Each structure stands twice: as C-alpha cells, then as structure tokens.
Amino acid sequence: MSKKILAINSGSSSIKFKLYLMPEEKLLISGSAENLGSSTSQLSYKTDKTNETRQIPLKNHSEAIDHIIDVLMSSGVVKDKSEIYGVGHRISHGGSYYTHAVAVTPEVEKRIDELKVLSPLHNPNGLAGIKAFEKFLPDAKEVVTFDNSFHHTIPKKAYMYALPYEFYEKYQIRRYGFHAPSHQYVSEKARELFGKEKTRRMITCHLGNGSSVSAILDGKSVNSSMGFTPLAGVVMGTRCGDIDPEIIPFLEEELNIDSHEMRRIMNEDSGLKGLSGISNDEREIESAAKNGNERAQLALDVFVHSIQQYIGAYTTDLDGLDTLVFTAGIGEHAAYIRSQICKNLDYLGVKIDEEKNKNNELSIEAPDSKVKIAVIPTNEEIIIARDVMNVTQQ
C-alpha cells in the first residue's frame, strides 16, 4: 500500500522538506523555510500545479514546521494530518552509536543531544525538528537518517587518528565522515547512469556551504574528508577545514578566549567568509574576484586547492579514478569552480569540456578524458524517505 512520507532536512537556519508517495517515489510537494530567526525569513514550496513564496516571520524551527504543516494542508496534497505515515529527519552526527537509520526513541533523542558538541550548527536544530513533529504529527512514525551512516564502511586505517589508542576506546575519537545521504545518492545515481564498471573507482564532491569529498569503491565509502566532526576536511563557507591543531591553543592564549569561542570562530567565521572578508556565498565571492578583489580570489584559490588535494589523495586510496562527480549548490552550479578544480588534474586523465561545463550538463568531460566527469543534482531527501520505509517495514 502506498504511504505518504515526509523527508525533513534541517539546517542551521533553514528546513528543506519533500513529501513523497512511497514506494513509488512520487514527489508530491517540495519546499523550504529559509533565514529562520531573521527579518528576511520566507517559506517557499512547489507542486505540479503551484509555485509560491511567502514572506513570513519565522522565529525558529518549531514555528517553521507549524507553517510547513499548514502548507501541506492548504496545497491539497494532504487533506488530514493522519495521512502522513512517517517523517524522516536528517541528523548530522550519530557518533559511533548508529551505522544506519533508526526509529526515533527517547534514547536516540538523548544521544543526538549529547552529540551536539560535535556538530553545533546542525544537531540542535535537527533535534528541534524531531520534537516539533512529535507535537504536530503525534501519530506519524519518526525515523532518523544520520549524516555519517553511509561512511561506516571506511576501513580502520583510514578512520583512526594517531592519538593515544585509549582516546578511541574511551571517547570514540575517529573519522566519521558526513553528508552521507548526498554521497550515497549521487554515487548510486552515477552507477545507475554510467554502469558499475565505469564507476568502480569514484570520487564524489559535495560542494556547498558545507563541503566534503568522498572516495567510493564498488559503491562503498572508503574515505571521506570530514572527520570527528563536520569541521574537518576541505575549506567551506564558514568552516576552516583542516588546520594545524597547534593553532587552536595558540589563538586561545593570544586572544584570551576559551574553547567555546574558538570553536565558534572555526565554525562560523572562517572558510570562504574568513578569507574573503565578504561572505560565505561563493557566488558573491566569485563576482568580487572578477572585479579585482584579491582576497576574494585568494579565498577561491584556497577552496579549489583544498579540494584538489583530497582528489589526489583519494585517487591513491582507490588505486586510480574512473568517475569524478560534482554535486550540491556549488558543485551543481559553479562552472568556474569545477573548471579550476579539474585544471590541475591532467595527470589523472581528467579533461573537462568547457562548453559542456558552462551549461551544467550531466557529463562534462572532454572526448579524450580518461575519467568520466559528472554533474549530478543531489537528492538527500529521497534517501531519507527510503530509510523511513526500510525502518518502519522491518
């Protein structure tokens, strides 16, 4: 029997949602609540008949969810709240507790709250979303998809840090990897589109305000750039990515700040925003760079270089490269960034077709490229919806 499944993707100041008819995977409505807590907050949605944006003051995630429920009802895709069989939530950090999606329980909620120290931008808001839907849809089955679950196949040699081993045993300090639904979706889609043989050794680049690179071998994640927390890896919108760890106590002493303020600086004031001094939005930085802003150009150069380093390293992990995939906001739309990343990868046989790249085509490799280069729009929400079905049908 078909069931209506709501997929919720809560960010630090936004909520994306999609309602599917499952298992047909028919999209009934999609939308987002943006800029929560600010004067520019808005709610937009579209169906096959409607495309609407509402300027609404939304103080927090709970208020946004109240309006999302109203949109589902007023759009006609849901006539009664009881029609929504299940709600799936994307949660950033599940630690070592969860390697797959699970049903929401008080114990799961407690773990999510405990792990907010490792993902301060996302875990609290994800938990707020869970609690809000418990209030608004008390009869719906709630399921959590964790942002690190797809990466549980990373081998120990790749996820261990060279710290005293007892830190791993006692605190589970290790590399986890994140953006799991996105890397899972685009890697599965690439295998479906191009065949398993051409995608056996694949690197997926999820590039947005949060960015990560993953190595996929025969459909399984074997390495990913984010680490113990989503702060590690490549340069991001406001996050610093990899830095010398000695910088942290040095700045705490020099600036006379505590660890909480240092964590905030690395998560909220760094990355493209910190380097450029302009914004965390790649589009604004690229525009400034074209107008001669040297710091804007530097920010883009550092961003690109950090991604190239991971692609080179992960090609070693994979013993070669068959397919390179770009996805997420920057990966799907920033032709300049894709071009710059591919420029120095000739040694891997990566050659881009600039015309196809400018048009954001599916395959953007040149005819003589030894590596398939693909631009695949991500769909984290369908992974979440599938997880709801899998967990509740067991």
Image: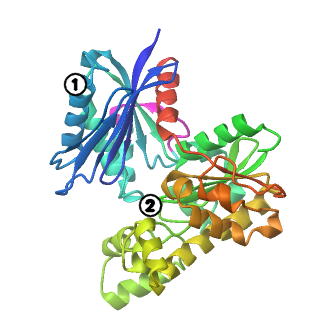
Per the image, the residue denoted by label 1 is: 74
Q: Residues within 10 Å of mark 1 (few under 14, many from 20)?
A: few
Q: Amino acid at mark 1?
A: Ser
Q: CA distance from mark 2 to mark 1?
A: 32 Å
Q: Are marks 2 and 1 in contact (CB under 8 Å)?
A: no
Q: Earlier in the sequence, mark 2 or mark 1?
A: 1
Horizontal arrangement in the rendering, residue 366 relative to residue 60 (left or right): right
Seen from this angle, which residue lies furthest front? Answer: 355
Q: Nearer the viewer, residue 221 or 167?
A: 221
Indicate the secondary structure of the residue bearing disc 2: loop
Horizontal arrangement in the rendering, residue 62 relative to residue 222 (left or right): left
Per the image, the residue denoted by label 2 is: 209
Q: Does any portion of residue 186 appear in the rendered image?
A: yes
Q: Does any portion of residue 238 appear in the rendered image?
A: no
Q: Residues within 10 Å of mark 2 (few under 14, many from 20)?
A: some
Can you give x and y, in whole percent of width and height, for residue 113 in the image? 33, 48
Instruction: Give, as a single range, the part of the protein colored magenta.
Output: 97-106
